[in-house]
Structures are given as C-alpha cells and as structure tokens.
C-alpha cells in the first residue's frame, strides 16, 4: 500500500479563531475526531461483529467519502469555530491510502494537537512517514498480549507481533508519548490487566483501560460484561501504589501516576463515571456527517452542501448552529433511557 505525501503545506498560516462557540449546555467546541474510513482489517466483536460486518455489509464507496481536500476545508472551518485538537480515526485509518496527505494538510492548519488512533496492524510501515507529514501522537488499540485472546478480540488473522512492531515503530519515529488503548471485557481479557500494566511500564507506554461501551446496536452489549474503572484501578493498586492526577478540563481519561516514578496509566469510565458535563468533542464521519455525540442516531450532512458549492460562510453557519443547538448527554442519562436505543456504529463515526 502506498501512502502519498504532500510536503508543501507545512508553511500554511494558522487559522484565525472566531468567538468560541458554546452548545445549549455551555460546552465549548474544542476537539474534533475525523473518521477517514468506515472499513477495517479487524472485526473486534465489541465494535464490528462479523455477524453484522460480513460480506453482505455495504461499506461506503470511495466517491461517498470526503477527499483529503474536503477534510482540510471542513477542518479549517472547525478550527475557526474553536477546535484546537484533532484526532484521525476510523474504521482503521491506516487503510486510507492518502492518509499522509490528510495529515500534511491538517498539520498545515496549525492545530495544537494532531493525533491518530489505530489498531496498529499497519503502523510499522507508516509511522515514520506519518511523523514526517506532521502527525504528533498516536494511540494504538491493543486488548491482549496473549496471541489467542488477541486473535479472538480482533477476530482477524493479523499477528499480535505486527501490532507490537507498530508500537515500537511509532516510538522510534517520535510519535511520543505513544498510548495504548485497551477495552476490558469481563471473561475475555480482564485477567490480563496487570500483565498489560507491567508490559506498558517497561516500555514507557501510557496504557488506558476503557470500559466496554454500548456503542452502536450490533455488539450485543450487556452491562455484566463491563469491567468498571473502579475494579481496574483496584486491580492495579494491588500491585502498585498509584496516585490520581488532576483531571484536565474535558479530558476523558482519569489518569494515575505510578508512585515509583515509572510513568502513568488511565481509565476511561464512560459507563460508570460519565463525563458529558464538559464534553467538547465533535465527530465527523468519513462521508462528511457531523455528530455531536458518540451515541447520536443522526448526523448533519455537510458533504451535500459542500459539494453543491456552499461557500465557507454557509458551511460554518451550519456547523456553528448545530453545535449551539447541542444538548447531548447520553452517558449521563443511560440508566434512565429506554433500551435499546438506536445509535450510530463506532466503526462509522470513530472512537
Ligand atoms: N480502528 C482503530 C482502533 O481500533 O484503534 C480506530 C477506530 S476504533 C472505533 C477507536 C477506539 O474505539 C479503539 O480504541 C477501540 O478499542 C474503541 N472501541 C470500539 N468499540 C468499543 C466499545 N464497544 N467500547 C469501548 N471502546 C470501543
Ligand atoms: Fe476495527 Fe478499531 Fe473497531 Fe477493532 S475497534 S473493529 S480495529 S475500528
Ligand atoms: Fe460526550 Fe455524548 Fe459521550 Fe456524553 S455521551 S461524553 S455528550 S460523546
């Protein structure tokens, strides 16, 4: 797979920011996740179960996906409305052939942070090129260090070693600090928490354990499968003294430092300790829909007006109005909502 690079964008001026836009609950727009593809080379059952994402599933054709130039144009408008941090995601973003071009274009907009979330399978090949294109950081998803559990939790033929090589390549390329995201599921990988912690500490990786979430409608989520952040913290505390770090505004992870000075870890307690109160994150799907919550059912189509020739002012008004009308706080309301509720799939909207 060849990823094309455009090296001529680095000198672009930063985007001038308008007044920060606030939603109906007073939350600013600061953080943007851009999904660059809905395809993936894994079929993690908690995200893209093969029963739903098998040969019969219709993925977006290339023509329906935003081009690199369209992504750049929308990102510039988001920057004008206050976004300072961008993360590229998917599906699996490394399946996108022009990923380095996308990175180069976004790097030229001068975001304070430009990061990537990947399953790591193809990262060893591309880490250095992405770093040169302007990527700052990478998070690699890894649920197990045991080859059999890894194979079951990724439902793929990818070798665990390829992901480990990808992590090492990202570190060598300077995409530091490399983070490792681990979804914990009861009865699957909850027995590996301490092994993962030791492995991460020994490599200066910050590991983040994520509570298994009820995203999408295909993963058959059950509350009993969630290993809570409190349980995870307790498990780690039995082996290591850990000290909570002050939570930064709108940070999704609760972070802890190891008292012996060997790094930090985090837990993302989306289910048991929701953080909707200062959620500043917008999400752009690969076909150009704006979602204001991970658990939304509908997104606002931006690609239609963009391709119909809508000028920047009109697109920015659409974006701003949608954010100003935002009232989402699904995770805080989860317990009181009728179940099942329809919401968009994680692989489509990005994590
Ligand atoms: N394919 C890339 C990857 O796996 O890193 C990027 C997209 S993936 C949707 C982004 C993140 O969402 C991953 O860290 C993944 O573990 C997480 N994720 C997916 N389904 C989840 C679920 N049901 N609960 C919690 N996290 C989930
Ligand atoms: Fe693919 Fe990432 Fe979803 Fe796993 S979590 S199926 S790697 S998009
Ligand atoms: Fe943000 Fe929605 Fe998650 Fe709440 S449930 S933290 S509003 S994405």
Image (cartoon, helix red, strand yellow):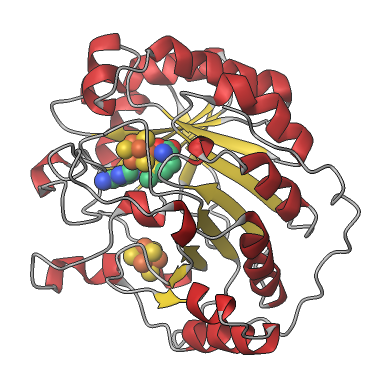
Report the front residue among 253 and 285. 285
Q: Quadrant of residue 217?
A: bottom left
Report the front residue among 80 and 61. 61
Q: Is residue 10 left or right of residue 186?
A: right
Q: Measured along the vertical axis of the image, is residue 203 above or below residue 43?
A: above
Instruction: Please indicate, yes or no, whether residue 32 appears anywhere in the rendered image.
Output: yes
Q: Residue at x 74, y 83 (%)?
A: 18
Tally of marks? 0
User: What x and y, as percent, mark residue 155?
Assistant: 24, 26
User: What x and y, as percent, mark residue 68?
Assistant: 64, 55
Q: Residue at x 44, y 84 (%)?
A: 25
Assign the N terminus to one quadrant of the image.
top right
Report the front residue among 151 and 95. 95
Q: Measured along the vertical axis of the image, is residue 70 above or below residue 56?
A: below
Q: Measured along the vertical axis of the image, is residue 33 above or below residue 171?
A: below
Q: Residue at x 68, y 31 (%)?
A: 175
User: What x and y, as percent, mark residue 52?
Assistant: 16, 45
Instruction: Please indicate, yes or no, whether residue 275 appears anywhere in the rendered image.
Output: no
Q: Is residue 243 left or right of residue 137?
A: left
Q: Residue at x 31, y 70 (%)?
A: 296
Q: Measured along the vertical axis of the image, is residue 236 above or below residue 148?
A: below
User: What x and y, as percent, mark residue 144?
Assistant: 32, 20
Q: Quadrant of residue 316?
A: bottom right
Report the front residue among 243 and 97. 97
Q: Quadrant of residue 334?
A: bottom left
């Amino acid at each position: 797979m060849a990823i094309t690079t455009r090296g001529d964008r680095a000198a672009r001026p930063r985007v001038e920011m308008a007044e920060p836009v606030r939603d109906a609950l007073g939350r600013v727009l600061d953080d943007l996740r851009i999904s660059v593809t809905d395809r993936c080379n894994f079929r993690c059952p908690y995200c893209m179960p093969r029963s739903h994402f098998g040969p019969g599933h219709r993925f977006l054709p290339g023509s329906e996906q935003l081009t690199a130039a369209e992504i750049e144009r929308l990102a510039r408008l988001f920057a004008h409305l206050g976004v300072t941090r961008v993360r590229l995601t998917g599906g699996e973003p490394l399946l996108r052939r022009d990923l380095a071009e996308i990175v180069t274009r976004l790097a030229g907009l001068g975001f304070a942070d430009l990061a990537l979330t990947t399953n790591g399978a193809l990262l060893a090949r591309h880490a250095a090129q992405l770093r040169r294109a302007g990527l700052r950081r990478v998070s690699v998803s890894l649920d197990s260090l045991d080859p059999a559990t890894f194979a079951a939790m990724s439902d793929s033929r990818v070798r665990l070693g390829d992901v480990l090589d990808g992590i090492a390549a990202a570190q060598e390329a300077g995409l530091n600090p490399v983070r490792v995201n681990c979804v914990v599921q009861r009865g699957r990988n909850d027995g590996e928490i301490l092994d993962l912690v030791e492995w991460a500490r020994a490599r200066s990786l910050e590991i983040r354990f994520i509570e298994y979430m009820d995203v999408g409608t295909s993963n058959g989520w059950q509350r009993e499968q969630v290993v809570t952040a409190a349980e995870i913290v307790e498990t780690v505390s039995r082996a290591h003294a850990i000290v909570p770090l002050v939570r930064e505004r709108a940070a999704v992870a609760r972070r802890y430092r190891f008292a012996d000075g060997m790094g930090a870890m985090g837990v993302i307690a989306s289910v048991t300790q929701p953080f909707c109160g200062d959620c500043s994150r917008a999400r752009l799907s690969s076909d150009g829909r704006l979602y204001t919550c991970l658990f939304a059912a509908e997104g606002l189509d931006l690609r239609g007006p963009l391709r119909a020739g809508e000028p920047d002012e009109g697109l920015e008004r659409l974006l701003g109005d949608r954010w100003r009308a935002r009232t989402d706080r699904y995770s805080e309301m989860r317990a009181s909502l009728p179940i099942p509720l329809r919401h968009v799939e994680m692989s489509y909207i990005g994590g």
